[in-house]
Amino acid sequence: MENLERILTEHPFLKGLDKKHIELIVGCASNVIFKAGDFIFREGESADSFYFIRHGRVLIETYVPQKGPIMIRSREEGEILGWSWLVPPYRWHFDARAVELTRAIALDGKCLREKCREDHDLGYEIMKRFAKIIAERLEATRLQLMDIYGNGTHK
């Protein structure tokens, strides 16, 4: 646990978080490893965790009939994977697949949601940090759509 505490304390996502909150988060954390080709989660499945990627690369994909899987984004070392655990109905919106050996710290979403219910200060900090991630990802999606569909002007 001490090692996970050190790793999480040093992660930019949790930077500046109170030590007591880090300790609560560590109680929901575990090390996980995914081999190349392993699905970390699948669209529609229950979203009950998120990941701090420590090593490796993960593709976020969606399946399009008659086209197959389409890559949306990738996540790499130092990044967070998954926010669906935070928003009801807690279902994944995409697939996530390791494209190489990937090591991560998994955070149990149910465990963390319960700790956030019990400690509203922790809940506020987690929500504030995930709101920033969600906003950044929405902006990245907007830019991606502009690349696909042009400059956004309507004729």
Image: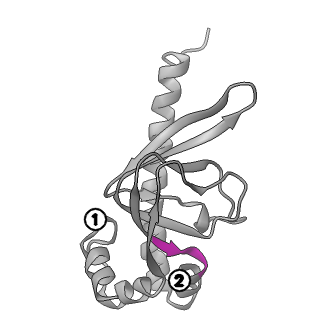
Residue displayed at 53% across by 87% down: 115
Q: Which mark is residue 12?
A: 1
- The image position of residue 3, as x and y in percent, is 28, 82
Assign the N terminus to one quadrant of the image: bottom left
**Amino acid type shown at disc 2:** Cys
Majority secondary structure of the magenta segment? strand
- Tell me the quarter of the picture where residue 11 sits: bottom left
Q: Is residue 104 left or right of residue 123?
A: left
- The image position of residue 58, as x and y in percent, is 45, 49
Q: Is residue 72 left or right of residue 19?
A: right
**Amino acid type shown at disc 1:** Pro
Q: Earlier in the sequence, mark 2 or mark 1?
A: 1
In the picture shown, does residue 31 fall above or below 24?
Answer: above
Residue range corresponding to the magenta coloring: 106-110
- The image position of residue 53, as x and y in percent, is 38, 60
- Asked if labels 1 and 2 touch by Cβ distance under 8 angstroms, the answer is no
Marks 2 and 1 sit apart, C-alpha to C-alpha, by 20 Å
In the picture shown, does residue 94 fall above or below 127?
Answer: above
- The image position of residue 48, as x and y in percent, is 62, 70
What is the secondary structure assignment of the residue under circle 1? helix
Local crowd size for mark 1, using a 10 Å CA cut-off: few (<14), some (14–19), many (≥20): few
Q: Which mark is residue 116?
A: 2
Residue displayed at 28% across by 65% down: 12
Residue located farthest toward the top when viewing the structure as drawn: 155
Report the colour scheme: one colour
Residue displayed at 56% across by 69% down: 49
In the picture shown, does residue 97 fall above or below 149?
Answer: below
- Tell me the quarter of the picture where residue 30 sits: bottom left
Residue displayed at 40% across by 54% down: 101
What is the secondary structure assignment of the residue under circle 2? helix
Q: 78 and 148: which one is in front?
A: 78
